[in-house]
Amino acid sequence: QVQLVESGGGLVQAGGSLRLSCAASGRTFSNYAMGWFRQAPGKEREFVALIRWNSGNTYYADSVKGRFTISRDNAKNTVYLQMNSLKPEDTAVYYCVARPTIPTTVVAATPSAYDYWGQGTQVTVSS
């Protein structure tokens, strides 16, 4: 059974940085796509970033492009989300996600396309 455990959330001032981690376990993740979604209060879940486990290729939402970086450590089975230049509108619960096949860019932004979700970690950016 795949398990995803996020950590690294917290409170930060606007302009600051945080790094989220997602520890994955339960199987090998070759050919998997892993990523991050977020959900702000009263809003739908929003795609943030995706990484292809084998190739390391990445894909980002326009709202975070140039500020966030997704990466993975194969040896540790961990995915990271480095968040810089944070804005109050980045405040949300951030979820780690995984699916066993590589999605198209359209499918990548669809929450229901992912088989596995972590429990979420809160990120709060104060103005």
Image: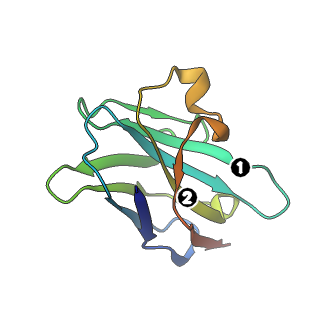
Q: Amino acid at mark 1?
A: Arg
Residue matched to label 1: 45
Please tell me which residue is depicted at 35% across the width and 56% down the height of the picture.
80
Image-based side of 90 in relation to 102, left or right: right
Image point (66%, 65%), residue name: 91
| Above/below status of 95 relative to 18 | above
Percent of width and height locating residue 98: 45, 45
Image vertical order of residue 125 relative to residue 110, above or below = below
Residue 95 numbered tag = 2
Quarter occupied by the N terminus: bottom left
**Quadrant of the rendered image containing residue 47:** top right
Q: In this orientation, which residue lies closer to the viewer: 1 or 56?
A: 1
Q: Quadrant of the C terminus?
A: bottom right
User: Of helix, strand and loop, which one carries label 1?
Assistant: loop
Looking at the image, what colour scheme do you see?
Answer: rainbow
**Residue 117 to residue 34: above or below:** below
Left or right: where does residue 26 sit relative to residue 10?
A: left
User: Left of 45 or right of it: where is 125?
Assistant: left
Q: Residues within 10 Å of mark 2 (few under 14, many from 20)?
A: many
